Amino acid sequence: MNMWFPFLSLYFKNLVVVVVVVVVVIVVALAIVLVVVAVVLIVVVVEVVLVVIVVASVKVVVVVVIVVVVVVVIELVLASEQDVSIEEKVLVSGHKQMGCDSIHSVVGRKLEG
């Protein structure tokens, strides 16, 4: 039995090394799986948050548009009740009217005489 003992000792040492390596590989694989799951969860949470932000932004835009429309309708109703006319000025494409243009015109007329 003594002559087999060194071989058994070597066998068990190798077995311990193999078991340790297998356990380490399993732990590393589980860690990788956990990291992948965590990344997927973070991506999902970020997407949900972005969707909530977009939906909230759309709601805000819709509310602002509704408020603007209501204000314009109220102004039109009040203007028609008080017999006020609303004049719209539309610029022709390619032409712009600026405040400085009218000042230049006044100065030009004064200089011409």
Image (spheres, helix red, strand yellow):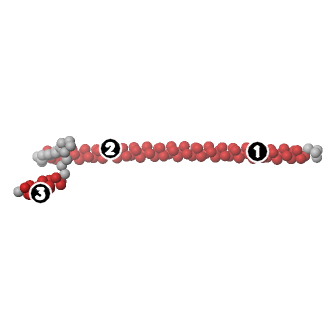
Q: CA distance from mark 3 to mark 1?
A: 97 Å
**Where residue 79 appears, x then y in whole percent?**
15, 47
Front of the two marks 2 and 1: 1
> What amino acid type should be assigned to the residue bearing mark 3?
Val
Q: Nearer the viewer, residue 89 or 26?
A: 89
Q: Dots 2 and 3: beta carbons under 8 Å?
A: no
> What amino acid type should be assigned to the residue bearing mark 2?
Val
Q: Is residue 81 visible?
A: no
- Quarter of the image for residue 19 reads top right
> Which residue is drawn at the image coordinates 39% and 46% (left, top)?
56
- Tell me if mark 3 has few (under 14), some (14-19) or many (20+) residues whose alpha carbon lies within 10 angstroms of its own: few
Could you say whether the residue bearing mark 3 is in a helix, strand or loop? helix
Q: Residue furthest top?
A: 93
> Which residue is drawn at the image coordinates 44% and 45% (left, top)?
50
Residue marked by disc 2: 62
Residue marked by disc 3: 107
- Quarter of the image for residue 51 reads top left
Residue marked by disc 1: 19
